[in-house]
Image (cartoon, rainbow, N blue to C red):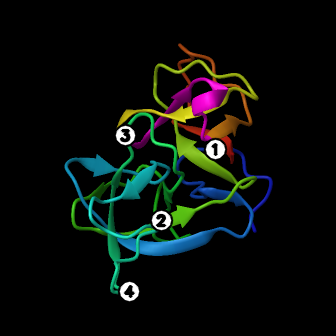
Amino acid sequence: MRNNVNPRANTSGNVIAVTGDITKREAVLNGAGTLTPGCLVIPFTGVASEGVGIDGSTGSVQAAAAGNTRVAVLDVTSTEGMPLDSEYVEGDQVPVLYPAKGHIVRVRIASDSDVTQNTPLIAAANGFVASGTLAAAIGIAREDIPIGDPDLPTFIMMEVL
């Protein structure tokens, strides 16, 4: 368990899972584009849930779309040296975290989001989160992120609902 992580730390502070004993599985990144640690992902169409194929083999994941209600987050491949701004591309073997209710994780925040602590967070496009309504929320912000801040971090601490 990792506690007391500074969510505004630079990208060399490579921790996504902040609290809790979170399930972690390997999957293959599918779909167009690149993703980075902290992005939300979902099982790729036709593959069983939680990154495991129907036959027990490694499954596939893709970027979560806006409105997704399931929480799975790309992790760093190693706690030794992989910066949080590293990019995964299609076909890469990626570590995926499956946090449960109450776990706290660092997730990527959309650049146009103005978030205060305790704001409901929803899945936005391309694996990011943004402020939203409690009815659609996947988590709650555990810090303030003001829009227009030149030092805007790319991450926010989120407690999973």
Apparent side of residue 39 relative to residue 119 in the rendered image (left or right): left
Against 67, residue 46 (above or below) is below
Q: Residues within 10 Å of mark 3 (few under 14, many from 20)?
A: some
Asked if residue 85 is positioned above or below residue 91 in the image, the reply reads above
Reading the image, the residue beneath label 2 is 96
Amino acid type of the residue tagged 3 in the rendering: Ala
Within the image, what quadrant is residue 51 found in?
A: bottom left
Q: Earlier in the sequence, mark 4 or mark 2?
A: 4
Position of 157 compared to 123: left or right? right
* Tag 4 residue: 56
Q: Where 118 sits versus 61, above or below?
A: above
Where residue 65 is drawn, which disc sits there? 3
Q: Secondary structure at mark 2?
A: strand
Percent x, y for residue 20?
Answer: 75, 64
In three-dimensional space, the C-alpha distance between marks 3 and 4, rounded to whole angstroms, equals 25 Å
Asked if residue 60 lies in the magenta stretch, the reply is no
